[in-house]
Image: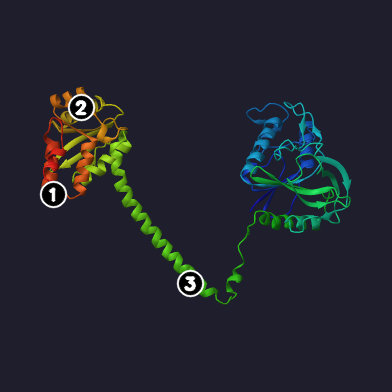
Amino acid sequence: MRILSLSHRLMHPSIDNHNIFNAPSVFDYEAIVVDIGGIAKTIQNAISSNESYLTHSDRQIINGESLDEVTGIKDILDRRQEEFTRALENGSVVVAFIDAPSQITGVKGFQGLDRYFFLPAPAGINWDYSTIKGGEGITLSIADDEHPLVKVLEVYRTELLYRSYLNENVPGIAGKAKIIARSSGDAVLAAEFNVLNGKVIFLPTPVPSLTQTTSQRESEAFVIAFPELFKRMDSPPPNWVQEIDVPGLDALESEENLRKTELERIKESLAEATSLADNKRNLRNILWTNGDHALKLAVIECAEILGFSVSETTKNELILSSNDKDLFTVVDGSIDAVDMSPHYRLRSQIDNVIEKESQSPRGLIIANGQRLTKPEERQNEISVPLQIAAESVGYAVVTAQEFFNATIAALNGTTPELLETIHEKLLSTDGIVNLTEIYSKSE
């Protein structure tokens, strides 16, 4: 777990130290530490030009409008506000060193900016003067011994200099704050709040300049505390742990591996069964879908069950073949009767073949008319102009319902001779094809 720390220097390889301007996107972290006063000081320094700042992508920060090579303070602060909100929506934990909520002035585009502008609060609470009171002290008393951040607070025992405290009497605080530590005068110095899907936890401030030893202890305490806040172990055990014998563990691990093997076999069997079931389920798509994706795929699956060989041209034109004879096939669906659209597509394909091979191929249109109506209630699946065109030009038209019913008959055990008859009917008919009369005679 990597920790982002803004304006509070921590010393650990897993902690990324940045300021409010040069930090990467805040929502990319689930563990975040912020120094409220330090962030405010950084912003004021940028406003007064006492210090020069860059963004994470090395764009210059200016107190003005963003241009091609520079970024305005207002724009990046707006962005940070959105990033903190998104981080908490993602379940992040933000640990904030509490400070008085005074105004930040001078940012062009803002009339006034509170120090807590970027930090969302629970519903009904504002991080303002009524909630956060100014105060100074050096005493600390732990109220919740089990809280993971007690490890950090213990580091500050002798180096504490708090500058603010939480007013637990303000409306909305009661029942929403989990108190972690108080001053000797009972002021709330550390508390946890649920905010969006994450947590905001306030801690008192240590002295401005911690010794190197204390800073290292503080950093290590944060690294230990954050995984505990998320209730998980953040690092794998050392290799030697595996060498320590625990009575009965070997047998349990053998049983575990056996169950894993069984589970993988069940998963493979389930995947195979699901695939086979999907193949059968998808046959029904021919009755209600349209277009060259869903309807075409359903037609292909039905055609293969009916014994046709299926291929496509380089232009993805569908060809059904039987006994070395090809049917250039166009599929089309409509909520009304299928109109002349597939006719024009089929004619174009046939004309291309005539031009290249000097012969006229046979054609087939599979029409899924009235596709959203129950099959037995359909009255007008093929338009009259399409029927006339098929008869005069010389190609077959079959409804998707007829093609599907023939497929079901094949699945129920239609003889090879009947399938051959179906093939010949589709290959030779000019106009609408009735397949039902073929296989119903054998029943």
Query: Which quadrant of the figure has residue 267?
Result: bottom left
Type of amino acid under label 2: Arg
In depth, the one of 22 and 130 nearer the eye is 130
Which mark's residue is nearer the viewer, 3 or 1? 1
Is 114 displayed left or right of 268 in the figure?
right
Q: Position of residue 393 (x, y in %)?
A: 14, 25
First in sequence: mark 3 vs mark 1: 3
Q: Which mark is residue 347?
A: 2
Query: Which quadrant of the figure has residue 22?
Result: top right
Which residue position is annotated with label 3?
254
In depth, the one of 421 and 44 nearer the eye is 421
Q: Residue 415 carries which label?
A: 1
Is 409 displayed left or right of 286 in the figure?
left
Q: Residue furthest top?
A: 385
- Tell me which residue sits at (27%, 31%) in the image: 332
> What secondary structure is found at the residue carrying circle 3?
helix
> What secondary structure is found at the residue carrying circle 1?
loop
> What secondary structure is found at the residue carrying circle 2?
helix
Q: Position of residue 76 (x, y in %)?
A: 68, 34
Q: Position of residue 104 (x, y in %)?
A: 79, 32
First in sequence: mark 2 vs mark 3: 3
How many C-alpha atoms fall within 10 Å of the one at disc 1: few (<14), some, or many (≥20)? few
- Up-down: is 302 above or below 69? below
Q: Where is residue 316 in the image (x, y as percent from the top left)?
A: 27, 36
Which mark's residue is nearer the viewer, 2 or 3? 3
How many C-alpha atoms fall within 10 Å of the one at disc 3: few (<14), some, or many (≥20)? few
In depth, the one of 213 and 347 nearer the eye is 347
Residue 207 seen anywhere in this rendered image of the structure = yes
Type of amino acid under label 1: Thr
